[in-house]
Amino acid sequence: MPWLKALPIKSDPVKVSFYYLVVLYEYLTAQPIKIAKKVLEFVRSKKYDKKVQLVKTVPGIGTLIAIEMLVELQDVSRFKSTNKFSAYIEVTSEYSTGENKRRGRIARCGNTRVRACSVEASWHLNTKDSLMRKKYDMPKRMNGAKRAIIAIALHLMLRVRRILLDKALCYHVCSIII
C-alpha cells in the first residue's frame, strides 16, 4: 500500500479516483477482521459459550460454523423428532410408504445457512472421522461424492442435535446416533 500511495500520478481526476479506490480497499480489507472480533465476542456470551464448546467437539466443526449453526437453529428442543429436525434443515427430502423409505433430492426449502454449514463441516468431518469416512465411501461409489456428502451432512446434524439435547460431548454421543 505505501508503494501504491507513493505512485506519481499527474492527472488530477485520476489521482482523486485512485485515492478513493485505495481508501475503499483499506476499508474493505479491515472489515473481515472487525466482523471476526464481533463474532468472537458473541461466542463468548453466556448464551452461546457452553453450546459452542459442545458443538465444537464434533470433528470438522470450528467456532464460526458452530456459532452460525447455533444462531440459525436456536433451541433444538423445539424439534420433537429427528424427522422434524431433518425437515427443518432439509438435507434430503424423504418419501415414505409403509416400510419403504426413499430419500430424494434436496428440496431447497429448508434453512439454507444450516444446510450449507453442515455440508462444509461434513467435508472436514470426512477426513477426521474414520467411521464417517466409511459411511461416505460406499454411497460415493454408487451415487457420487456430492450425494454421499449430503448423507454425511445429515449424520453430522443429527450428532449436533443430540449433543445439544443431551448437553454431552461428541465422543459420548457418536455411538448412540450411528
Image: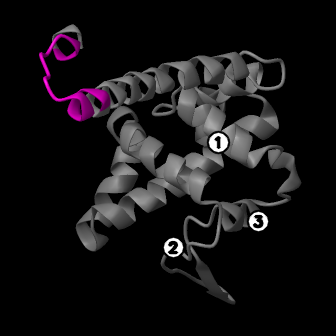
Identify the image quadrant of residue 149: bottom left
Q: Secondary structure at mark 2?
A: loop
What residue appears at the point 18 percent right and 10 percent down from the top-left corner?
6
Q: Is residue 112 above or below residue 107?
A: above
Mark 3 or 2: in front is 2
* Tag 1: amino acid: Met
User: Label 2, on which residue?
Assistant: 106
Disc nearer the start of the sequence (1/2): 1
Residue 107 screen position, x and y as percent: 56, 77
Kindly tell me whether residue 57 is visible in this rendering: no
Residue 67 falls within the magenta-colored stretch? no
User: Label 1, on which residue?
Assistant: 69
- The stretch in magenta equals 4-16
Kindly tell me whether residue 31 is visible in this rendering: yes
Q: Is residue 73 above or below residue 28?
A: below
The span from disc 1 to disc 2 (Cα, nearest Å) is 19 Å
User: Label 3, on which residue?
Assistant: 84
* Tag 3: amino acid: Lys
